[in-house]
Image (spheres, helix red, strand yellow):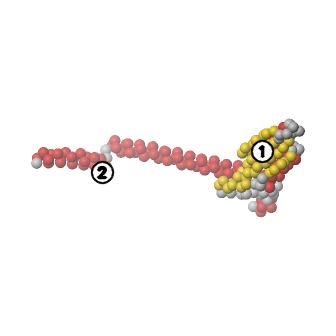
């Protein structure tokens, strides 16, 4: 019985001593907790700074997209995209065999992705002029995919058939703002 009492006292002291450190912490425990607190506080401020930088870069990217499309025309983005392709084909004397309707996909908020498929036919030099004319203005037309193949047939040895999908990113569903709306603001 005495041994059981001694074991109980020893166990009680060890359990109480661990709990006593929580109730009456030593200098070392306080120092370690303060150090951990300072470390966590600096990590939190660093994380908040990174979050702010991320939000700034996201807003900056959105504003750059909006500034990217600042011209004087009042045309919707999908109409502008079709006109741009028709102009480039006419300028390069290519045959515009087909052009699909514009497919719109909402990316985030008012930002829209516009895609359309085209099929043009002509000589290699004319294809090069067509591609250069598409990239001439600062409007973000880019190729999702593009295939060039010989048009086929004995009479058409130097004729190339270009098939592809062009994409453009637009904001607010429109490419350009109305000048009257700008004046009212």
Q: Secondary structure at mark 2?
A: helix
Q: Furthest-left residue in view?
A: 1
Q: Which residue occupies 75% across, 57% down? A: 174
Q: Secondary structure at mark 1?
A: strand
Where is residue 94? Give x, y as percent: 86, 44
Q: Which residue is the site of mark 2?
A: 23
Where is residue 151? Give x, y as percent: 83, 41
User: 177 and 113: which one is in front?
Assistant: 113
Disc 1 from disc 2: Cα separation = 77 Å
User: 183 and 91: which one is in front?
Assistant: 91
Quarter of the figure with residue 172: bottom right
In the image, taking residue 156 as reference, residue 143 lies left or right, namely left
Where is residue 90? Give x, y as percent: 87, 47
User: 96 and 71: which one is in front?
Assistant: 96
Give the numbered dot on residue 103.
none
Q: Is residue 15 among what the camera can see? A: yes
Label 1 packing within 10 angstroms: few (<14), some (14-19), many (20+):
some
Q: Is residue 77 among what the camera can see? A: no
Q: Which residue occupies 54% across, 49% down? A: 48
User: Which quadrant of the figure contains the C terminus?
Assistant: bottom right
Where is residue 110? Give x, y as percent: 68, 57
Q: Which residue is the site of mark 1?
A: 163
Q: Which residue occupies 28% across, 49% down? A: 19
Q: Examine the rendered structure and indicate whether residue 126 appears above or below residue 83.
A: above
Answer whether labels 1 and 2 touch (C-beta < 8 Å): no
State which mark lies toward you, 1 or 2.
1
Q: Furthest-front residue in view?
A: 154
């Amino acid at each position: 019985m005495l041994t059981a009492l001694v074991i109980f006292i020893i166990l009680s002291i060890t359990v109480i001593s661990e709990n006593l450190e929580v109730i009456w912490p030593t200098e070392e425990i306080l120092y370690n907790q303060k150090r951990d607190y300072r470390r966590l506080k600096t990590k939190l401020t660093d994380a908040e700074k990174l979050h702010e930088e991320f939000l700034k870069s996201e807003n900056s990217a959105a504003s750059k997209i909006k500034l990217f499309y600042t011209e004087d025309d009042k045309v919707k983005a999908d109409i502008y995209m079709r006109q741009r392709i028709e102009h480039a084909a006419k300028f390069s004397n290519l045959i515009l065999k087909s052009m699909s309707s514009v497919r719109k996909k909402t990316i985030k908020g008012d930002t829209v992705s516009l895609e359309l498929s085209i099929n043009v036919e002509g000589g290699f030099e004319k294809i090069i002029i067509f591609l250069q004319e598409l990239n001439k203005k600062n409007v973000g037309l880019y190729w999702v995919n593009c295939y060039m193949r010989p048009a086929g047939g004995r009479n058409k040895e130097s004729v190339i058939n270009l098939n592809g999908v062009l994409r453009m990113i637009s904001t607010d569903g429109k490419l350009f703002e109305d000048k009257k709306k700008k004046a009212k603001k």
